[in-house]
Amino acid sequence: MKLLSLLSLCAAGSAFVLPQQQQPLQGILHAADALAAVPELWSDDTPRLLELAPGDAVWMKEGDKLRLMREGKKFIDITDHRDLGATVHASAKQPVSFPSNITHSEIVKPIFKSLSADNIRKNLKQFTSFPNRYFRSDNGRQSSQWLQSLISDTIDSAGAKNVTVTPFKHTWPQSSLIARIPGKSNKTIVVGAHQDSVNMYLPFLSAPGADDDGSGTMTILEAFKALLTNKNITSGQAENTLEFHWYSAEEGGLLGSQAIFSAYEKAERDVKAMLQQDMTGYIKGTLDAGKKESVGVITDFVDTGLTEFIKKVIEEYCSIPYVETKCGYACSDHASASKAGYPSAFVIESAFEYSDHSIHTSGDTLDKLDFEHILEHARMTVGFAYELAMAKF
Ligand code: BES
Ligand code: ZN
């Protein structure tokens, strides 16, 4: 118990640790990560139904999730959403045809002037200053509230009157957030990232989650901010509605995104496309391996047509190429959209094998990230959102 209290004091004693205070703690926290791997130190016996592969669900305990993560095993916690995808409605059953060409380059490229690497860095610095963003903790609740204010300020600064941000409440303290830019129809294009972070050794230890997924969180916020400088978007004249989602509890087994897409499925919401941005900032692994900087287009558990479309977006709007790569089952929130019958795509920072290995530890920090690379993901997001907002489905 003494060790437990010491660790929790080190890691999460204050609700908001300033970046300069955080540095001296890193050594202690790395040591704590190692010590905390002793399983008896923490357990939560709440039964949860975890799907380890399609159709393979096993009753385990809440406390088993971090162990699975340490073992590199992926899971969806389907306890509350066993019926996700069961009532797939008529609009979602029709395969969606995506544009065969990029057609709005002359409007989209000038929007890129509003994207700023410094702004992303500034936002991410504050976001990673929470001791962690664990979805079941008060830190997670506070980080979500802080993010909501940042999104809200972004909307206010743009003077975008029809644009809203709304918390999507869950049975745990951290809410998901949904920003909505209404278009001429309710057909909806979703861009997503997850706001929570976790330390896989113990949930109350430090988890800056700079790359996983602070990077995606701030990538899509910067793209959102840039899109709000365009009158075609803010005037409601786009063919389709745009939504930006910041999911809670991805690390708990895609809990936030399942709750949202389950609600959308039940409400017969017509989601035409979903793009997930999870880990957009780490390129050192690629460069150290002697490879060229690129983005990684995920090809498993995604929609083939939408994935072909995102490749065209990258070719047109990014200054680096893509490589195809695989992530495995239930890698991130796009899997919840897919399960609900909505086409989804997923693009990561690199080929999977060269992605950031310090995720889920206190070492997932800002200094490891490349903000010019994050800008490439932001350009892709703006291009994806604008092209599909204007597409006639
Ligand atoms: N960001 C990761 C997924 C990821 C890992 C993307 C490496 C790109 C490269 C995500 O937050 C995660 O941790 N997913 C878990 C499964 C999840 C359902 C708990 C995983 O991949 O182990
Ligand atoms: Zn993760």
Image (cartoon, helix red, strand yellow):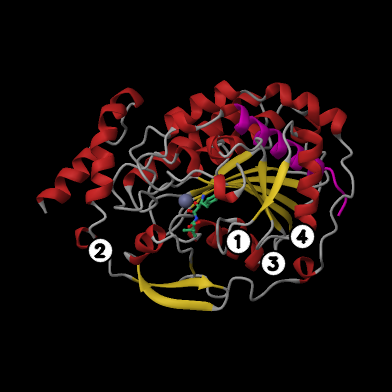
Circle 2: element type: loop
Q: Is residue 8 magenta?
A: no
Q: Is mark 1 within 8 Å of ligand 1?
A: yes
Q: Residue at x 71, y 33 (%)?
A: 379
- The residue that label 3 is drawn on is 341
- The residue that label 2 is drawn on is 43
User: Which of labels 3 and 2 is toward the front?
Assistant: 2
> x%, y% of residue 287?
58, 35
Q: CA distance from mark 3 to mark 4?
A: 13 Å
Q: Earlier in the sequence, mark 4 or mark 2?
A: 2
> x%, y% of residue 40?
20, 62
Q: CA distance from mark 4 to mark 2?
A: 40 Å
Q: Residue at x 46, y 46 (%)?
A: 357
375 sits to left or right of 104: left
- The residue that label 4 is drawn on is 304
| Residue 12 seen in render | no
User: Which of labels 4 and 2 is toward the front?
Assistant: 4
